[in-house]
Amino acid sequence: MNMHIGVLKEGDEVLSVTKEFIAVRRKNHEVDLIPLVEDPKFGLRVDAGKIVTIGFGNNEISVETEDGDFVMNF
């Protein structure tokens, strides 16, 4: 089976691929860690609900909850 994972946009670059994630440097220089999970029916798939973005800021971490609320840590 061949698989195509379309997560790149114009100007993006793949930094690394492991069995756990794909690291993508976006055009704006932020990095997305895109999780890969094993699906018994289809093999690997992207877990789009758990992407971690490493971006610019003042050492802060924010998480959006399922309800749409934001939790911030400094």
Image (cartoon, rainbow, N blue to C red):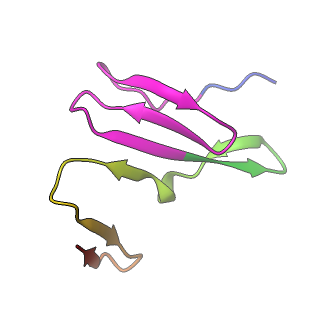
Question: Residue sitting at 70 percent across and 39 percent down?
Answer: 19
Question: Residue sitting at 25 percent across and 27 percent down?
Answer: 27
Q: Quadrant of residue 44?
A: top right
Q: Is residue 29 left or right of residue 17?
A: left
Q: Position of residue 51 (x, y in %)?
A: 45, 52
Question: Residue sitting at 31 percent across and 75 percent down?
Answer: 68
Q: Position of residue 74 (x, y in %)?
A: 22, 73
Q: Identify the magenta region.
A: 5-34
Would you say residue 50 sits in the magenta stretch?
no
Q: Nearer the viewer, residue 74 or 34?
A: 74
Q: Quadrant of residue 65?
A: bottom left
> 58 above or below 12?
below
Q: Is residue 10 left or right of residue 37?
A: left
Question: Residue sitting at 42 percent across and 53 percent down?
Answer: 52
Residue at the extreme left of the image, as rendered: 58
Q: Is residue 27 left or right of residue 63?
A: left
Q: Position of residue 53 (x, y in %)?
A: 35, 50
